[in-house]
Image (tube, rainbow, N blue to C red):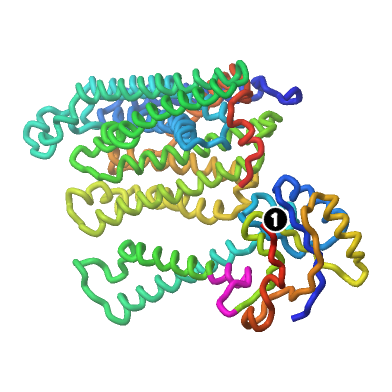
Amino acid sequence: MSSIKEQFEIPAKLKTWSYALIGVGLLALIVGFITKGRGTEEEQAVFIGTIMYNTIFWTLVTNASMFFICITTLAMGGWQQSFRRIPEAISTMVPIFGSITVVVLLYVVFSGNHHIYHWLDTNAVASDEILKGKSGFLNVKFFTIWTLLAVGLWSLLGWRMRQLSNEADVAAFNGETGPSFIWRNTVRAAMFTVWFALTVGSTVPWLWLMSLDAHWYSTMYSWYTFASSFVSGMSLIALWVIYMKNKGYLEYTNEEHLHDLGKFMFAFSIFWTYLWFSQYMLIWYSNQPEETLYFKHRVQGVYKGIFFLNLIINFICPLLILMKRSTKRNYTLVTFMAVLIIFGHWIDFYQMVMGSISKEHVTLGWLDFGILSLFVGLMILFVAKALAKKPLIVKYHPFLKESIIHHT
Amino acid sequence: MAKKKFVVGCFDDEATLFPAVKKVRTAGYKIHDVYTPFAVHGLDHEMGLRETSLHTAGFIYGITGTTTALSFISWILTYDWPLNIGGKPHFALPAWIPIIFELTVLFAAVGMVLTFCYLCQLSPFIKKHHFHARATDDLFVMVIETTDKTNVEDLKAFLSNAGAVETDVQIAEEGWWLGRYDKDQVPFQNKIVAA
């Protein structure tokens, strides 16, 4: 153990880069506010929508890290222990990005911005049978409470999970404390997973994203959103693992672990496509006007290019490139694919949100990339800080050896 | 169908098998195969076996299935027998995807199973020599090919040194043959192993 570099020191370059990205992002935010944020209601909706999909995307992606820890814990997985501190550090972003999301969403809801959420328009709801039927779910009170609860409990339960892993830094476990440690991990992971299912797996995408098209619904939508965020989350973990390997940390992590991360990226890209297609085909086949309205301007309108680019980046590329075993064990190719997948799903979130807010014009431009750079910068800076706070190895975790000798 | 002389070393533990494989290889002997009661992780790597090309074969079978389904359905529904189904276009790609997918999986699965059997020389009416009955029970059986120059006694001693609990010399077919065990060869050649 003595030769292991346990403590991460933040390289100056990383700080410079993240500050630069945050600076660019803030600049874009300010310029965007001046040029669009004070314009017509449509322009304001585009401005807020752009921030909205970015913050929702990054909240869900970073939250996927904690979900990854919890499911591997529940499955009694040992292989992830050698780099477990990476997803832990990424999940510390949930309170930060979550708060931004809460602020943005509650601002939208309380300012009654019905260009974004049509169901906020009380006059429209009063004379609309469909919206009236949904009003028990789509109303300001429920939205507010559920959003606060979702972000609050993700942060709290994730924090409890991270606190527990601190015990593995202190002292070795024995036959008595070891199983009890694993059991407490299981219980806390289960609590998070159940809440995750009730939020990311169902209600949160309905409230935050699907209600942008207030009349439309799809039972695939939440799973689709979850798959999108989970595959990007796995890609983000892979990127950080590779970065740390490049800096000479994580000696116990090798291409065997990378291979498994690559498998997750591959498998959940396919899973995402499965949901994409299931949602698309059923609506295409039954051809009901109230269902096809979601796809109308995406498949036949101005969003056509982005809509199919999305499918190529998120399905064809991972399918053909990540299929080979040697690709999943290659640091360069996994890095490339991880960046591509995160970008692809960011585009996916873009068309999910902006395709509903701005149906006639594709708004993708400097503002989108500026806000993206703000979130990427924040993520890099705070994840690096979180990584520097704790040892990189859960030294006394009972399953650590399993991870060291891991073999795929 | 050449008979060859093999030296067989039996190990009763994975932990002794791995270093033994390494020692045998560095000593320059050629390992014919290692027969184990269960799949041993990393043994293929230790034996220096090349990566299997079964997945490449699977990919090709899958692509074949995709092309077969796509070309056949599109030929039927756009050229040979176009039907108006619910006012959909004749070239109704989304509706075909499930069938294309199923045929891809079917071709890949069946093709890979058959290829796997072929690579492992598994088939009805095909026989292979069994080096040790307990290879399917609790022994790890390492089989080493010999040449005219191999000193068999040396090799046996070498294996015992490396931790083999049992060693012997067998002259056997190296590949498969068509036929029946009872006629051509008693499968375990009087090697009734004492439990």
The magenta stretch is B114-125
- In depth, the one of B176 and B68 nearer the eye is B176
Dot 1 amino acid type: Phe
Q: Residue at x 68, y 29 (%)?
A: A249
- In depth, the one of B122 and A49 nearer the eye is B122
Q: Is residue A31 above or below residue B33?
A: above
Circle 1 packing at 10 Å, graded few (<14), some (14-19), many (20+), is: many
Q: Which residue is mark 1?
A: B140
B169 left or right, relative to A266 = right
**Residue B123 covered by magenta stretch:** yes
Q: Residue furthest left?
A: A127
Q: Report the quarter where the N terminus of chain A lies.
A: top right
Q: Residue furthest front?
A: B194
Asked if residue A62 shows in the view, the reply is no
Q: Residue at x 79, y 53 (%)?
A: B164
Q: Residue A365: where, in percent of width, then height?
A: 43, 37
Q: Residue at x 17, y 52 (%)?
A: A289
- In depth, the one of B174 and A191 nearer the eye is B174
Q: Residue A62: where, in percent of width, then height?
A: 46, 30
Q: Residue A207: where, in percent of width, then height?
A: 26, 32
The total of numbered circles placed on residues is 1
Q: Residue A36: where, in percent of width, then height?
A: 35, 27
Q: Is residue A370 above or below residue B119?
A: above
User: Disc 1: which chain?
Assistant: B
The image quarter containing residue B10 is bottom right
The image quarter containing residue A187 is top left
Asked if residue A295 shows in the view, the reply is yes
A327 left or right, relative to B18 = left
B127 left or right, relative to B171 = left
- In depth, the one of B21 and A250 nearer the eye is B21
- As helix, strand or loop, the secondary structure at mark 1 comes to strand
